[in-house]
Protein backbone atom coordinates (compact mmCIF):
# COMPACT_ATOMS: atom_id res chain seq x y z
CA UNK A 1 0.00 0.00 0.00
CA UNK A 2 2.86 2.34 0.76
CA UNK A 3 4.26 1.82 -2.74
CA UNK A 4 0.93 2.83 -4.25
CA UNK A 5 0.79 6.00 -2.15
CA UNK A 6 4.34 6.89 -3.18
CA UNK A 7 3.55 6.27 -6.84
CA UNK A 8 0.42 8.45 -6.70
CA UNK A 9 2.27 11.20 -4.86
CA UNK A 10 5.12 11.23 -7.36
CA UNK A 11 2.68 11.18 -10.29
CA UNK A 12 0.74 14.10 -8.83
CA UNK A 13 3.88 16.14 -8.18
CA UNK A 14 5.26 15.47 -11.67
CA UNK A 15 2.08 16.29 -13.61
CA UNK A 16 0.79 19.19 -11.51
CA UNK A 17 3.20 21.72 -13.07
CA UNK A 18 2.02 20.67 -16.55
CA UNK A 19 -1.03 22.88 -16.05
CA UNK A 20 1.21 25.91 -15.68
CA UNK A 21 3.32 24.97 -18.70
CA UNK A 22 0.26 24.76 -20.94
CA UNK A 23 -0.64 28.34 -20.16
CA UNK A 24 -3.67 30.09 -18.80
CA UNK A 25 -6.90 28.09 -18.89
CA UNK A 26 -10.11 29.79 -20.04
CA UNK A 27 -13.76 28.80 -19.76
CA UNK A 28 -16.48 29.89 -22.17
CA UNK A 29 -20.22 29.29 -21.68
CA UNK A 30 -22.38 28.37 -24.68
CA UNK A 31 -25.92 27.05 -25.14
CA UNK A 32 -24.44 23.54 -25.37
CA UNK A 33 -22.40 23.79 -22.17
CA UNK A 34 -19.11 25.12 -20.83
CA UNK A 35 -15.91 24.61 -22.81
CA UNK A 36 -12.39 24.81 -21.45
CA UNK A 37 -9.55 26.07 -23.61
CA UNK A 38 -5.99 27.28 -23.14
CA UNK A 39 -3.78 30.13 -24.25
CA UNK A 40 -1.87 29.54 -27.46
CA UNK A 41 1.80 28.66 -27.28
CA UNK A 42 2.34 30.21 -30.72
CA UNK A 43 0.60 33.59 -30.44
CA UNK A 44 0.12 36.20 -27.75
CA UNK A 45 -3.37 36.87 -26.36
CA UNK A 46 -4.98 34.01 -28.33
CA UNK A 47 -7.16 31.43 -26.57
CA UNK A 48 -7.50 28.03 -28.25
CA UNK A 49 -10.68 25.93 -28.05
CA UNK A 50 -10.14 22.76 -30.10
CA UNK A 51 -12.76 20.15 -30.89
CA UNK A 52 -15.95 22.20 -30.49
CA UNK A 53 -18.78 20.48 -32.36
CA UNK A 54 -20.94 22.70 -34.56
CA UNK A 55 -23.73 20.11 -34.85
CA UNK A 56 -24.93 16.82 -33.42
CA UNK A 57 -23.24 13.71 -34.86
CA UNK A 58 -25.00 12.46 -38.04
CA UNK A 59 -26.07 9.05 -36.75
CA UNK A 60 -29.35 7.06 -36.95
CA UNK A 61 -32.22 9.43 -37.86
CA UNK A 62 -29.85 12.35 -38.46
CA UNK A 63 -28.01 10.51 -41.25
CA UNK A 64 -28.20 12.39 -44.59
CA UNK A 65 -30.19 15.24 -43.00
CA UNK A 66 -29.26 18.90 -42.44
CA UNK A 67 -27.14 19.55 -39.32
CA UNK A 68 -29.03 19.33 -36.02
CA UNK A 69 -28.18 21.46 -32.96
CA UNK A 70 -25.47 20.23 -30.62
CA UNK A 71 -26.72 18.11 -27.73
CA UNK A 72 -26.08 20.03 -24.45
CA UNK A 73 -23.91 18.43 -21.78
CA UNK A 74 -23.84 18.83 -17.99
CA UNK A 75 -20.10 19.01 -17.28
CA UNK A 76 -17.55 21.20 -18.99
CA UNK A 77 -15.74 19.85 -22.01
CA UNK A 78 -11.99 19.73 -21.71
CA UNK A 79 -10.62 20.81 -25.08
CA UNK A 80 -6.93 20.75 -24.33
CA UNK A 81 -5.46 18.24 -26.78
Image (cartoon, helix red, strand yellow):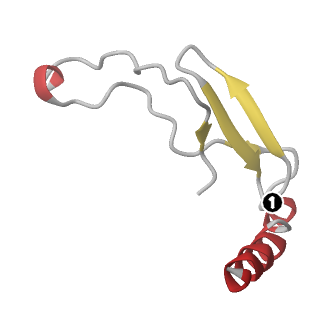
Q: Nearer the viewer, residue 13 or 60?
A: 13
Q: Residues within 10 Å of mark 1 (few under 14, many from 20)?
A: few
Q: Where in the figure is residue 49, as x and y percent of width and height?
A: 64, 41
Q: Quadrant of residue 70?
A: top left
Taking the image as shown, residue 37 lies to the left or right of residue 67, namely: right
Compared to residue 58, the image places residue 44 above or below, namely below
Compared to residue 51, the image places residue 20 above or below, namely below
Residue at the outermost bottom position:
3
Taking the image as shown, residue 34 lies to the left or right of residue 69, namely: right
Residue positioned 33% across, 25% down in the render: 56
Q: Where in the figure is residue 66, as x and y percent of width and height?
A: 23, 17
Q: Nearer the viewer, residue 15 or 56?
A: 15
Q: Quadrant of residue 40?
A: bottom right
Q: Nearer the viewer, residue 45 or 57?
A: 57
Residue positioned 51% across, 43% down in the render: 51
From the image, tell me which residue sits under label 1.
19
Residue positioned 58% across, 57% down in the render: 81
Give the total of numbered labels. 1
Q: Where in the figure is residue 18, as x and y percent of width and height?
A: 79, 67
Amino acid sequence: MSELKNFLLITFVVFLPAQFVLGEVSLVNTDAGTYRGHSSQHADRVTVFQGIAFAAPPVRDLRWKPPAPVIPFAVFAKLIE
